[in-house]
Amino acid sequence: MGTDIYTQRSEEDFFKARNKALFNDLQHFLVPDESKLLSFAEIKQMLKPQNEVYKGMEAVPVKDIVGSEGRYHDFDNHFFPRNMHLKSRWTSIDKAHLQNVILPPIVLYEIGGLYFVRDGNHRVSVAKAQGVEMIDAEVVSLQSEIKLKSGMSIRQIQKAVIHYEKRVFYNETAFGDITDCWNIDFSTPGQYDVLYQHIQIHKYFINQTRSEEISTEDAILSWYHTLYIPIINIIKRRHILRKFRHRTPADLYVWIVKYWDELKKKFGDSVSMDSAASEFTDKFGEGPIKRLWRKIVSKGLTKRKKS
């Protein structure tokens, strides 16, 4: 097989892979995030690994390589190439694969049981396109208690992280046993730490007026009944969740408290919780008309970009 044949084959392989990426984008038109390659920085921020361990050379399952440190915009979630500017590099690596040329090992980060490319994105893309099952890699492992599975979308990973954070929060604080409330849920990671901070701040201010320090259990009960539940009741009474789609009452609690604190810094402690919730909803909430207008504006901007 001559060199020209290898060139022709590699170009055919590239366009097949790119067409798969285009078709994948079309299939996920309504939920585009599901066709995106995972960003290592985003996953690292969610999982918050404790430390790094150099593991050295390993044979890694290609199916478990799910993201990239810096090239996650260039490939889809199957590592198929999304852009034409990748063609030259991609075809040269594919040609080497066709000619059985041994390439240097790739460099990967491992976190939660999944792998992210630090160096060698094109080599992984070619390996996936050619059905290669294992690839040699130099691996650095980031230690995390959260375990992930290959094929998980960013939303599924977020849910796994939130579930883990909820379990840790309830176990470490005994919150459910103390309050008999087990349904504080969030739509984004990192919010249970915010709740814990609120409880600690609440405890601090109570202790300023006492000769004996209040227990953590009593502080949790006090925070729950004097701050959390009243705000949740406002959210329910005003039907605020209707204007914040896909959010939870606990999401709104955190946001309203933050906004309430900002208002009190500007206008003093006379600002009521109720008025803060009302102003927050008017300022940031989306009713049917506002959502429709946002869609119209978004479509208009898209058309202008294409033209």
Image: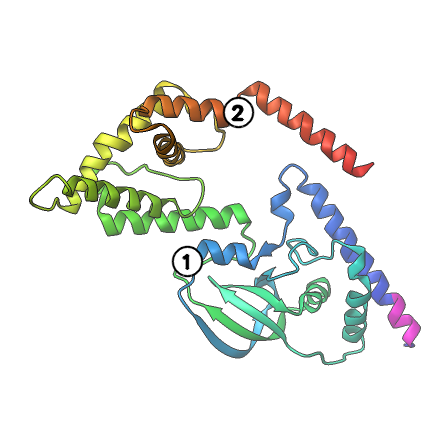
For badge 2, the amino acid type reads Glu
Q: Nearer the viewer, mark 2 or mark 1?
A: 2
Quadrant of the snapshot with the N terminus: bottom right
Instruction: Give left or right: position of 166 versus 59.
Output: left
For badge 1, the amino acid type reads Ile
Q: What residue is at 50 percent from the left and 47 percent from the top? A: 156
Q: What residue is at 78 percent from the left and 51 percent from the top? A: 19
Identify which residue, 211 or 144, lies in the foreground: 211
Identify which residue, 44 or 82, lies in the foreground: 44
**Residue 220 x, y percent position in the rendering:** 20, 41
Instruction: Give left or right: position of 301 versus 251.
Output: right
**Residue 307 x, y percent position in the rendering:** 83, 36
32 inside magenta stretch: no
Q: What residue is at 75 percent from the left and 52 percent from the top? A: 20
Q: Can you identify the residue that label 1 sits on?
A: 146
Q: Can you identify the residue that label 2 sits on?
A: 286
**Location of residue 53 by image quarter:** bottom left
**Residue 289 x, y percent position in the rendering:** 59, 18
Residue 218 appears in view: no
The segment highlighted magenta reads 3-8
Q: How is the image coloured?
A: rainbow
**Location of residue 290 by image quarter:** top right
* Badge number at residue 179: none
Q: Secondary structure at mark 1?
A: loop
